[in-house]
Image: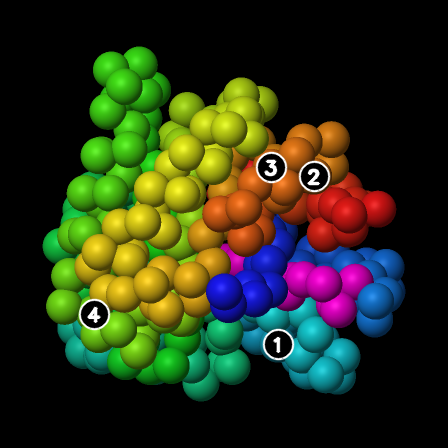
Amino acid sequence: MTTRTPLMAGNWKMNLNHLEAIAHTQKLAFTLEDDDFEHVEVAVLVPFTDLRSVQTLVAGDKLKIKYGAQDLSAHDSGAYTGEVSGAMLAKLGTHYVAVGHSERRQYHGENEALCNAKVKAAFANGVTPILCIGEGLDIRKAGEHVPYTLTQLDGALDGVPAAQAATVVIAYEPVWAIGTGEVATPEDAQEVCGAIRGRLAELYDREVADAVRIQYGGSVKSGNVAAIMSQPDVDGALVGGASLDADEFVRIVRFRD
Ligand code: PEP
């Protein structure tokens, strides 16, 4: 059985300008202790305009806090006004990029084909995609959450070779739990995260399935993170609102305490 280092990632969404990002990252860097990084990997997914500021700060911290973007273009370069390429992210030392966050799917019409192209664009540039998948409330109520989420997984990983798939991060984020305060139970999270790992074994093999980190996301807070993290197939958390409070995010990172 592969040992997976949990990834605790804060998704700042469209919050914190580059000056606020500096203050917030400094607070994280001062508060987090070396010990914290022995058990988990810590990352912040920041607006594009913050990447350079965060890079400059954490480079001096021996890159203990990793950083990522919240989206990327499926294209490498060219006439795509407003887009940011994987190559541009890579040039800024960006470790991670979220792909297919439910807010991108909801407000920007991102579908499986586009998520698939973005996953491939991230890998092509050496940036690790955090692929976000998860069902809405209607699907959950209909009891279709597992097949629905697995269909999103299949689509986004179509044609992705095993060597890359083994390094992808999957974030299971039930849409009804994002920003609502409505957290999934640990058992709910485990049911879908376990099914995702099972499907990875079918799509690839057991070794790939055991290597992939699967996060839970949706109203994670310091008060509920430990129970969620105790589930065998949950390897981290994608934290939205609560990551904007540096002290709270540090408490989440220290979920074992
Ligand atoms: C998210 O933005 O991915 C998220 C899970 O948000 P929140 O923690 O606020 O529900």
- Name the disc covering residue 55, or none: 1
Which range of residues does the magenta coloring cover? Answer: 36-47
Q: In this view of the protein, which residue sits in the foreground, 86 or 196? A: 196
Query: Is residue 167 among what the camera can see?
Result: yes
Residue at image mark 3: 228
> Percent position (x, y) of residue 82?
30, 63
Mark 3 surroundings within 10 Å by alpha-carbon count, few (fewer than 14), some (14 through 19), many (20 or more): many
The residue tagged with tag 4: helix, strand or loop?
Answer: loop
Do tag 3 and tag 2 residues touch (Cβ < 8 Å)?
A: yes
Three-letter code, disc 3: Ile
Residue at x 54%, y 46% (from the top left corner): 232
The residue tagged with tag 2: helix, strand or loop?
Answer: helix
Q: Is residue 49 above or below residue 99?
A: below
Residue at image mark 2: 226
- Label 1, label 3: how far apart the Cα atoms are: 30 Å
Three-letter code, disc 1: Gln
> Percent position (x, y) of residue 114?
18, 56
Q: Is residue 37 magenta?
A: yes
Residue at x 72%, y 83% (from the top left corner): 62
Mark 2 surroundings within 10 Å by alpha-carbon count, few (fewer than 14), some (14 through 19), many (20 or more): some
